[in-house]
Image: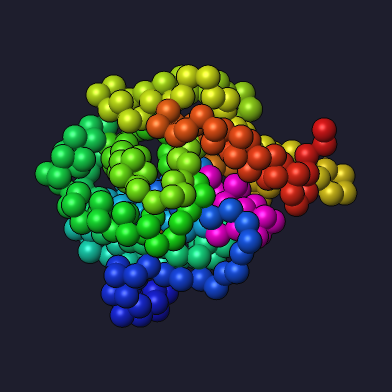
């Protein structure tokens, strides 16, 4: 179809990831998510890291995105395909959503995307069929994550917050990231944190650990770290960083509900510190978020 890139590009993506030009002296970050578009909850932090701190951000995406068709009515018209039909969607959405995430990645300034190509089968809250290896090829993903962490030497790994109401795919992606950091034997172990979006009139999700998975425990005495997307700047206070989030989510034409319901309403990105991290790393995360607060268009004190 005319809107899609040649399919040959994506054979190489599956093997080595897609590379965007980048040079950096800032922080090096790996984002681990389940689906194309999950990173929209972190999009302003990622944009500021790459554009303002001159850092590097890579992403590892677990699924092929083929199951994301429930809210694709408008996307179906845009792409000229009946994407609300599961058979049509599972045939075409994996390639469509790869193109969408590449478009979003250019906006955020990402360097590499590693596609793990696990099946985006159905909606469930249960991570066990995936993390057990029944539905996903866990040894394959673990091997790739280990190699990526060893070769790229990240300072930080960012995941979603694996609270009880999250999709089972989301929880599994977090578990895979946590276990990869646990296995890491190099001299510079990355700090792993969990991000979640928050609107100004909502309460943060109450979360200390996902039942049955002690590696998801949040360090009890660690602070949370917040990036404010919503403060306004420039003439007449007309502009905020929420515009960046709008640019990013607009890349996902095949997806509907997240555009309608969540992303523009997000005022803050809130990050939590996993217990497996050394307590000394808290200062490094505080320094990162202080730099983000002071960079670009800084919020008034």
Q: Is residue 89 left or right of residue 286?
A: left
Residue 259 versus residue 153: which sits nearer the camera?
153
Q: Which residues are magenta?
A: 42-56
Decide: is 134 above or below 57.
above
Where's residue 210, x and y in %? Answer: 33, 25
Give the residue at x 60% y 48%: 44
User: The C terminus lies in which quarter of the figure?
Assistant: top right
Q: Nearer the viewer, residue 235 or 150?
A: 150
**Foreground pick, 70 / 154:** 154
Q: Is residue 54 magenta?
A: yes
Q: Residue at x 46, y 49 (%)?
A: 188
Q: How many numbered badges does the structure rendering display?
A: 0
153 vs 172, left or right, is right
Q: Is residue 297 left or right of residue 182?
A: right
Using the image, determine if residue 51 lies above or below residue 210: below
How has the structure been colored for display? rainbow
| Residue 136 image position (x, y, % from top left) | 18, 49
Residue 103 location in percent, x, y?
50, 65
Q: Majority secondary structure of the magenta segment?
A: helix
The image position of residue 296, as x and y in percent, is 75, 52
Residue nearest the observer in this picture, 244 or 131: 131
Q: Is residue 64 above or below residue 158?
A: below
Please report the residue visible at 41 percent of the width from the left and 70 percent of the height from the top.
Answer: 18
Q: Residue at x 51, y 49 (%)?
A: 155
Assign the N terminus to one quadrant of the image: bottom left
Please determine whether, in this image, residue 98 is positioned above or below residue 192: below
Is 73 in the magenta?
no
């Amino acid at each position: 179809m005319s809107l899609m890139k040649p399919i040959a590009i994506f054979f190489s993506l599956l093997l080595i990831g897609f590379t965007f030009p980048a040079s950096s002296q800032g922080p090096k970050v790996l984002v681990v998510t389940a689906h194309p578009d999950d990173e929209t909850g972190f999009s302003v932090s990622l944009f500021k890291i790459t554009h303002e701190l001159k850092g590097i951000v890579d992403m590892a995406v677990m699924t092929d995105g083929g199951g994301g068709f429930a809210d694709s009515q408008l996307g179906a018209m845009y792409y000229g395909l009946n994407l609300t039909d599961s058979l049509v969607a599972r045939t075409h959405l994996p390639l469509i959503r790869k193109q969408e995430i590449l478009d979003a990645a250019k906006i955020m300034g990402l360097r590499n995307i590693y596609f793990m190509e696990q099946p985006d089968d159905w909606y469930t809250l249960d991570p066990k069929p995936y993390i057990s290896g029944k539905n996903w090829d866990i040894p394959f993903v673990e091997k790739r994550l280990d190699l990526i962490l060893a070769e790229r030497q990240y300072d930080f790994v960012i995941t979603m917050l694996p609270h009880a109401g999250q999709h089972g795919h989301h929880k599994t992606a977090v578990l895979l990231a946590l276990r990869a950091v646990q296995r890491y034997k190099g001299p510079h172990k990355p700090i792993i944190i969990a991000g979640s979006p928050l609107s100004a009139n909502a309460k943060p999700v109450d979360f200390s650990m996902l039942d049955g998975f002690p590696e998801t425990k949040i360090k009890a005495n660690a602070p949370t770290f917040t990036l404010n997307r919503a403060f306004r700047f420039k003439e007449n206070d007309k502009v905020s960083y929420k515009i960046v989030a709008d640019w990013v989510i607009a890349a996902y034409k095949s997806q509907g509900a997240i555009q309608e319901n969540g992303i523009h309403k997000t005022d803050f990105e809130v990050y939590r510190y996993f217990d497996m991290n050394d307590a000394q790393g808290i200062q490094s995360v505080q320094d990162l978020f202080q730099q983000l607060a002071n960079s670009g268009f800084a919020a008034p004190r």
